[in-house]
Image (cartoon, rainbow, N blue to C red):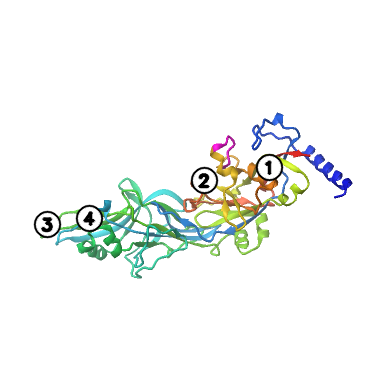
Amino acid sequence: MNKVVYINIFFCILVILSSCKKNKNKYLIDNTLPESDIPYASYVDTFSVLLKTERIDSIRIYNDGFKYLGSNQDPVFGRTDVELFTHFSLPNNITNVAFPSDVVVDSAKIILVFTENFVGDTTTPLHYQTYLLTESMDATQTYYSNKTFQYNPIPLSDIVTKPVKFNGFKVIQIPVYKGFAQSIISNSQYLVDNTTFQATYKGFYITTKNSALNPSNKQGALMKVDLSNNVSGFYVYYHTGNPPALKESKVYQFSFNNSATVRTNHIIYDYASGSNVYLYNQLNGNANSAAQNVFVKGLNGTRVFVDFPFLKNLNTLLNYSINRAEFEIKVDDSYSSSIGLYNPPVAMSLLALDSAGNEIFTIDQYNSSYSFVSYDGQYNSTTKSYRFNISRYLQHVLTGKIKHYGMVLVATDPNVTLTARKDFFASRVILGGYNHSTLKPKLKLSITSIP
């Protein structure tokens, strides 16, 4: 490069840096020093940020007791149906269960403890239908949100209901055809152990996808249930004895919780069913709609792609030391609904992408628990925003240690031991787009030039 041109570029950058706002952060990251010890440290928050909403194709469903069930017609995001597949089994892995020969089933029902963690409107009754699986589920396999299993098309239950109180818990009660329960307890040859039992009765498929919903007054809800709670189970109420005056009132509870149990969700997200126009356009390839708003939805919904164009050319001009880098994105609460309850996720993760488009941790997030400067990611209800410290990540990009392929904002816990659990948050949030008049996201840098 011509010497005069290089000097002019260098001089212009120094002028820009000297006109930037003074760094007001007390602590710095990478080569951490007090602000007073860093000469020529400058604070810049005028870098452009590019955003766009992307659809998440599928997520891993972890095999624990916490699962979602329900249907929600979100006035912004469209419709989501979450179906449940679960084994049921002999409690405590007991063996050789046998009922008296004169046992008669009075009623049967599935009870699911509702954790009261939900998205939408739980006052809307949902249409619950239950089927018996004909395809086996394997506890050693990993299942994803697009996985379904074959089932007998004759329903074991068909009822419209909403959560009620039972044994001190709020629960979803689903009455089951008592003839099915009678066949179970009358065939002791299948009750010798859980291996035999689950080979015969392969599990339940529970769905609410046929619920009639609308975004104005019947939005419905996605509800988190706890299948590992001792109250959750398949209850069979029966009596023995003859004549009827001598009937004994008894109950037998099959469990949703043992070592061989599979519990998984199938998630159907239909953004074309009544979603916001900005969201709809972005998911159909129109990135210009991201200028106003972008949309993050948990539970196999959407994520936001984040890019910083300056990274493509800044390090070709001068070397910089990143003292502090903070990405802030704000919530647009103008979409608040008076019907459903749609709180923003309590936390989110800002993840880097590798060359194959896979999500990976930034060094800031991975080392957050070992650093006095937090990665953050928690929702701040006062500022109505999320902030992420990505200082080390950007420093490594500028020094060439790693290559920047973009980042994604995802509704998942920023704790690295939990970030993979995208099946744990159902909440969603609308954020200011890259050109929003008042809610534009910012990348805030405290930097030092190194001649």
Residue 102 can be seen in this image: yes
Q: Which residue bears the numbered disc 2?
A: 416
**Rendered location of residue 170, percent (x, y):** 36, 49
Disc on res. 203: none
Q: Residue at x 58, y 50 (%)?
A: 351
Residue at the extreme bottom of the image, as rendered: 153
**Rendered location of residue 22, percent (x, y):** 73, 35
Amino acid type at image mark 1: Lys
Other-residue count near label 4 (Cα within 10 Å), few / some / many at <14 / 14–19 / ≥20: few
Q: Earlier in the sequence, mark 3 or mark 1?
A: 3
Other-residue count near label 1 (Cα within 10 Å), few / some / many at <14 / 14–19 / ≥20: some
For the residues bearing labels 4 and 2, Cβ distance under 8 angstroms? no
| Closer to us: 252 or 91 | 91
The boundaries of the magenta stretch are: 370-377
Quarter of the image for the C terminus: give it. top right
For the residues bearing labels 2 and 3, Cβ distance under 8 angstroms? no
Q: Is residue 48 left or right of residue 88?
A: right
Q: Which residue bears the numbered disc 3?
A: 245
**Rendered location of residue 130, percent (x, y):** 35, 63
413 relative to 370, above or below: below
Tell me the CA gap for discs 4 and 2: 40 Å
| Closer to us: 228 or 176 | 228
Tell me the CA gap for discs 2 and 3: 61 Å
Overall secondary structure of the magenta section: loop
Q: Is residue 190 left or right of residue 282?
A: left
Disc on res. 95: 4
Q: Residue at x 11, y 56 (%)?
A: 246
